[in-house]
């Protein structure tokens, strides 16, 4: 009987220990100041160029490099998808094979697989399982320009590009390209990247020129080069609340919000049309709202709108007396959609929509460059790029309640942070007490 009592007491103690461990774990996970999620950021080369996508835990642990760009690449923004299954980033590594000077790519944090979300497919690895056909044609200089350097003639899905020059009016360049068939009836674009003594590189775009036929040759005949001077650049990468689309600012003479379906598409579509020059795009984590900065004559404003909205649906929430687009401004939503964190003119602010309250959280007084702000899943901590010397940058954390700083990276080669809204699958680990293993 006494032996039975001893076992009963031991079982009771083990049960109490198990419940205590689980209770302690639950309290730690639910703590309002716990820094969950993972921070993605760009790694810089010695010359200050952003060349890699990295991740790190908020406590500085488990640093990883998921992607490194080519010698021609330059990463300019990073954004976790809402479900943390991909990290999107802007890179110009495949500019000769795209409608744009940069594209949106996405890397899987588990297996490091990379795809091109804008103007797909990714050039690297083509034909990548697609059937292929041949696309032939002649490009004729009918632009009136001379001494034109054709950097590339490229058909969407081609495994290479064609090169040549136009020395005189009506000169021609022939091309014969092996091209992946992206689908029956799918019309694939052609882009000409060119420059001359007056400038460039520019882009001349034929949006939908050929339906590639597997195992067959399609001859486009003679196409005229007319000297279009498009220079489409993208910036301000952001995901919508459910991860169905990615938003960017498309700059091509003017600056306007543009959206691409998360599954990937070639041309995308304009997100809204409020008028004026737009920057600092940020899509809401809870609904279809979008925040942005817009020039308004002699000043600027930070405004709210709906995806698909117009100037009539715009709500101005903050006036900005400094209208120049040369000033860095970045907006990050609070995770519950109640407000946002804003970096402007070298300082960090937060703003609560319901109360219209603006707080200045930093006082760098022009001594540093603040670039990209992002907020922890609980809304308490801000991660941001901080630099006092051109070409160097580190990631810092700022507590919104205590105003204390923590330096997360110390290599001077870290920029463009993005904090995941949830823990990625690869970082979700369950630890069981030894007594039940």
Image: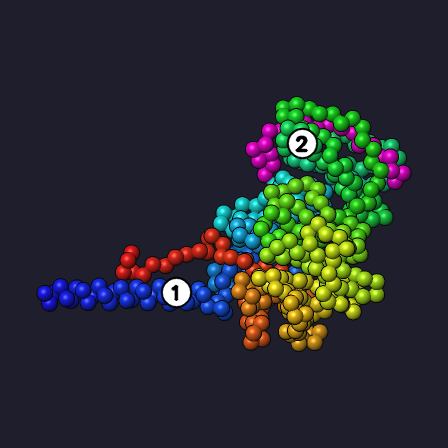
Q: How far apart are marks 2 and 1 (CA)?
A: 53 Å
Quadrant of image for the C terminus: bottom left
Q: Where is residue 236 in the image (x, y as percent from the top left)?
A: 68, 56
Q: Is mark 2 on a helix, strand or loop?
A: loop
Q: Position of residue 33 (x, y in %)?
A: 50, 69
Q: Is 127 a magenta residue?
A: yes
In this view, 1 is above or below 122: below
Q: What stretch is highlighted in magenta?
A: 125-145
User: What residue lies at 81% left-to-right and 51% top-to-bottom?
Assistant: 253
Pair 2/1: label in front: 1
Say which residue label 1 marks: 25
- The residue closer to the viewer here, 234 or 415, is 234
What is the quadrant of residue 98 in the picture? top right
The answer to whether residue 197 of the structure is visible from this angle is: yes
- The residue closer to the viewer here, 254 or 176, is 254
Q: In this view, does 306 lie to the left or right of 12?
A: right
How crowded pointer 1 is (Cα within 10 Å; few <14, some 14-19, many 20+) is rated as few
Q: What element carries label 1?
A: helix
Q: Which mark is residue 186?
A: 2
Quadrant of image for the N terminus: bottom left
Q: Where is residue 277 in the image (x, y as percent from the top left)?
A: 78, 57
User: What residue lies at 76% left-to-right and 27% top-to-bottom?
Assistant: 220
User: What residue lies at 30% left-to-right and 64% top-to-bottom?
Assistant: 18
Mark nearer the N terminus (2 vs 1)? 1
- The residue closer to the viewer here, 62 or 15, is 15
What is the quadrant of residue 28 in the picture? bottom left
Q: In this view, does 281 lie to the left or right of 168?
A: left
- The residue closer to the viewer here, 178 or 272, is 272
User: What residue lies at 58% left-to-right and 72% top-to-bottom?
Assistant: 400
How crowded pointer 2 is (Cα within 10 Å; few <14, some 14-19, many 20+) is rated as some
């Amino acid at each position: 009987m006494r032996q039975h009592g001893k076992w009963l007491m031991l079982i009771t103690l083990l049960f109490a220990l198990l419940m205590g461990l689980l209770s302690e774990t639950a309290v730690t996970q639910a703590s309002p100041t716990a820094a969950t999620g993972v921070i993605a950021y760009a790694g810089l080369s010695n010359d200050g160029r952003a060349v890699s996508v990295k991740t790190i835990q908020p406590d500085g642990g488990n640093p990883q490099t998921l992607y490194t760009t080519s010698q021609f690449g330059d990463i300019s923004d990073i954004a976790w998808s809402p479900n943390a299954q991909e990290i999107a980033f802007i890179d110009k590594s495949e500019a000769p094979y795209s409608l744009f000077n940069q594209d949106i790519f996405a890397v899987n944090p588990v297996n490091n697989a990379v795809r091109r979300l804008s103007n797909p497919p990714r050039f690297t690895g083509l034909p990548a399982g697609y059937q292929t056909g041949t696309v032939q044609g002649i490009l004729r200089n009918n632009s009136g320009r001379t001494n034109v350097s054709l950097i590339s003639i490229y058909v969407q899905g081609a495994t290479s590009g064609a090169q040549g020059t136009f020395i005189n009016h009506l000169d021609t360049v022939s091309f014969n390209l092996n091209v992946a068939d992206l689908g029956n009836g799918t019309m694939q674009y052609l882009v000409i990247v060119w420059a001359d003594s007056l400038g460039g590189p520019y882009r001349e775009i034929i949006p939908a020129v050929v339906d590639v036929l597997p195992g067959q040759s399609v001859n486009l005949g003679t196409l005229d080069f007319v000297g279009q001077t498009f220079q489409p650049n993208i910036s301000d990468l952001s995901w919508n609340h459910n991860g169905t689309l990615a938003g960017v600012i498309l700059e091509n003479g003017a600056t306007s919000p543009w959206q691409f379906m998360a599954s990937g598409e070639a041309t995308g579509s304009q997100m809204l049309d409020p008028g004026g020059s737009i920057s600092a795009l940020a899509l809401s984590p809870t609904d279809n709202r979008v925040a942005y900065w817009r020039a308004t004559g002699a000043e600027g404003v930070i405004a709210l709108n709906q995806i698909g909205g117009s100037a009539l649906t715009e709500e101005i929430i903050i006036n900005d007396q400094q209208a120049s687009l040369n000033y860095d401004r970045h907006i990050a939503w609070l995770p519950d959609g109640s407000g946002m964190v804003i970096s402007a003119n070298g300082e960090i602010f937060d703003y609560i929509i319901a109360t219209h309250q603006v707080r200045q959280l930093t006082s760098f007084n022009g001594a540093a460059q603040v670039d990209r702000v992002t907020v922890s899943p609980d809304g308490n901590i801000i991660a941001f790029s901080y630099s006092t010397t051109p070409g160097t940058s580190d990631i810092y954390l700022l507590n919104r309640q205590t105003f204390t700083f923590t330096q997360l990276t110390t290599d001077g080669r870290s920029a463009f942070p993005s904090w995941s809204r949830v823990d990625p699958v690869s970082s979700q680990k369950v630890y069981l007490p030894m007594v039940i293993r």
